[in-house]
Image (tube, helix red, strand yellow):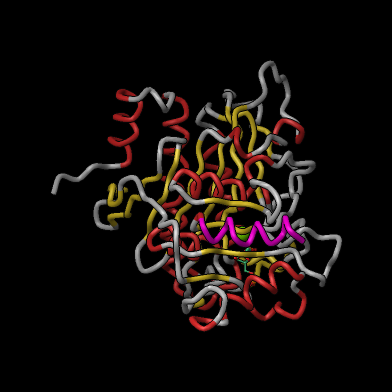
């Protein structure tokens, strides 16, 4: 089998379809290279003294793990000097991170969740990195938070890495979705799945069912119907999977279909869900749509949401098209 590396894939895309400008290609390569470094740190575990708490909290008041902080620093450092970026923003930092004056600046904005699935770090379950790339607004002098507040349809690239039994990188630049596997001996990303497609129908769903008593009626109705099995209104049995790492749940769905849900619920009526629009929902929605799936907040396409703030939260329903349509329909009817 002829092996195609990430670099080769990106260069060919740039040549054949003109879909990836050179600057964007280089930026993606830096992010991908950093994911290799993060993967290496993750795989060392206790031997690398990287497990456990960092003794700090992030802007959302969540306890930061050592690896959350380490992965964030790795991404910042690697992407500062390349000249492709105007600024970065991270789930782990309160404010945006402009490129220091000692480096040249570029036209892109990079957003990331450096280590998604933090609760799984210390127990050796798959975790990952999610990223999203936007263009800085025309004529912008100094980057501000406002520059980042663009709806997800404006993303020019998005991807995630999963640090699991294999380390994989899934990427879209708006021309389908491709998966690369890290060859640990050679240190290179090798194209292993081209043009990933999510089946329209599924018998698998993912939700944290411990929150069932807090769900609003549309979610409760939808899940009750799935759980009623073949004698219920859906006429078939559904299976449930919940890894508690969005990267790993989404990766399963890209491979064999399914519907992933993190709804808003009655615990905190003012909070529209747990997941973050800019670092989690938007990049995943872009990838899922590019693979033929759908992603909504129950009422609206996620990629159309105009963000009001950097750390905005959002309800998420994504995956196999027909199931996302169904659960979204229940919200619209409500
Ligand atoms: P994190 O970015 O702090 O790790 O939080 C996001 C994660 C998602 O990966 C996952 O789907 C969800 O939180 C799990 O939440 P819960 O622990 O409520 O099941
Ligand atoms: Mg996360």
From the viewer's perspective, tell me whether residue 318 is left or right of residue 292. right
- Residue 152 at what x, y percent from top left? 62, 39
Please indicate whether residue 148 sits to the left or right of residue 127 in the image: right
82 left or right, relative to 134: left
Report the residue at 52% width, 83% height from top.
231
Choose between 51 and 224: the one closer to the eye. Answer: 224
Q: Residue at x 56, y 48 (%)?
A: 285
324 part of magenta stretch: yes
| Residue 221 in sight in this render | yes
Secondary structure that dominates the magenta span: helix
Image spot of residue 24 (x, y percent): 47, 29
Q: Quadrant of residue 163?
A: bottom left
Q: Quadrant of ligand 2?
A: bottom right
Start-end of magenta stretch? 322-334
Vertical comparison of 62 with 35: above or below:
below
Residue closest to the eye, 155 or 224: 224
């Amino acid at each position: 089998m002829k092996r195609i590396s990430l670099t080769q894939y990106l260069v060919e895309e740039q040549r054949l379809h003109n879909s990836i400008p050179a600057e964007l290609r280089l930026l993606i390569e830096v992010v991908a290279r950093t994911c290799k470094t993060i993967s290496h740190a993750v795989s060392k575990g206790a031997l690398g003294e990287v497990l456990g708490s960092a003794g700090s909290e992030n802007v959302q008041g969540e306890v930061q793990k050592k690896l959350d902080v380490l992965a964030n620093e790795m991404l910042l450092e690697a992407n500062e000097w390349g000249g492709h970026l105007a600024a970065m923003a991270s789930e782990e930092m309160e404010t945006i991170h402009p490129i220091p004056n000692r480096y040249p600046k570029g036209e892109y904005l990079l957003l990331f969740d450096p280590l998604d699935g933090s609760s799984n770090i210390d127990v050796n379950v798959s975790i990952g990195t999610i990223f999203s790339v936007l263009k800085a607004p025309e004529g912008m002098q100094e980057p501000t938070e406002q520059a980042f507040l663009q709806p997800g349809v404006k993303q020019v690239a998005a991807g995630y890495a999963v640090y699991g039994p294999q380390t994989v990188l899934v990427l879209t630049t708006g021309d389908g979705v491709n998966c690369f596997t890290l060859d640990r001996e050679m240190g290179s990303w090798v194209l292993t799945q081209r043009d990933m497609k999510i089946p329209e129908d599924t018998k698998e769903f993912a939700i944290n069912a411990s929150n069932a008593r807090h769900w609003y009626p549309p979610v409760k109705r939808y899940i009750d119907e799935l759980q009623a099995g073949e004698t219920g209104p859906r006429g078939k049995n559904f299976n449930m999977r919940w890894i508690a790492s969005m990267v790993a749940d989404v990766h399963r769905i890209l491979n064999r279909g399914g519907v992933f849900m993190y709804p808003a619920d009655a615990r905190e009526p003012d909070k529209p869900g747990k997941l973050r629009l800019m670092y989690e929902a938007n990049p995943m929605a872009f990838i899922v749509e590019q693979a033929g799936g759908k992603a909504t907040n129950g009422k609206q396409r996620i990629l159309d949401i105009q963000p009001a703030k950097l750390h905005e939260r959002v309800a998420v329903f994504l995956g196999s098209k027909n199931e996302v349509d169904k659960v979204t329909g229940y919200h619209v009817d409500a």
